[in-house]
Amino acid sequence: MILFPAIDLKEGQCVRLIEGRMDLATVYSQDPGSTAKTWQEQGAEFIHVVDLDGAFAGQPRNRDSIAQIVQAVNVPVQVGGGIRDLATIEDLLSLGVQRVILGSAAILEPQFVAEAVEKYGERILVGIDAKDGLVAIQGWGETVEKTALELALEVKKWGIGTIVFTDIRRDGKLSGPNLAATGELAKASGLRVIASGGVSSLADIRALKELTADGVVGAIMGKALYSGAVQLPEALAIARGEG
């Protein structure tokens, strides 16, 4: 299981939100590149980046910070947030980004997502964010009448193999991931699932590790790392089956 330290970008700074609310942002660093390097030095094998401004604006807003992160590390980086066209994907990949995560576009621009998968294959992931079981879009500002599983099965038809699943109610709260929903989504969809939102302890990592047989292949960690609730080297040991 891969653990992804998260770097959420707002106006060039590393922040964490609660339930995706921009008015509840805590700034952890003003140097995204240095933050990424710190996680790499602690053993991270992959960095997860979200352009929060881009998610709300519908187009990337933190390109320079993303470039800094990619240049600062030699582990792969995946990026999501406001990516709505092939030119933007091409630009991010040209910066050295390894994988691009499409979110709201899966609802708003399904043809674009299908084209992106056809062109870039497994470098394209879909992020499925759910609030009370329904898919949330536009920076989590609104929900649509579609369940996470319904959307997962749709994107699977387009060729998507891996999704990032976030339970918004758990995000940034250190309340533990929604294990049941994450495991069920992986099993029912047959997709590889990266869990996101709520990871708060080493016990959560152990619990997610037990879901690997269902198709849970990774977990994104944000506030737990920044607050010191979890030390990355210890979490990585559990993810590797050593702890």
Image (cartoon, rainbow, N blue to C red):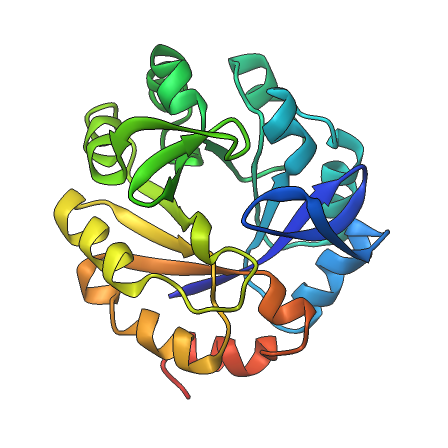
Q: Nearer the viewer, residue 151 or 38?
A: 151
The image shows residue 220, relative to residue 105, as above or below, that is: below
The image shows residue 107, relative to residue 199, as above or below, that is: above
Q: Which of 116 and 119 is in front in this view?
A: 116
**Quarter residue 132 falls in:** top left
Residue 171 left/right relative to 133: right
In the current view of this chain or complex, which residue is farthest to the right? 30
**Quarter residue 214 falls in:** bottom left
Identify the residue shown where x is 39% and y is 59%: 218
In the current view of this chain or complex, which residue is farthest to the left? 188
Q: Which of 76 and 163 is in front in this view?
A: 163
The image shows residue 45, relative to residue 201, as above or below, that is: above
| Residue 229 x %, y % | 61, 78
Identify the residue shown where x is 41% and y is 74%: 205
The image shows residue 52, relative to residue 107, as above or below, that is: below
Identify the residue shown where x is 52% and y is 17%: 84
Q: Which of 151 and 45 is in front in this view?
A: 151
Q: Is residue 240 visible?
A: no
| Residue 78 x %, y % | 55, 43
Q: Is residue 127 visible?
A: yes
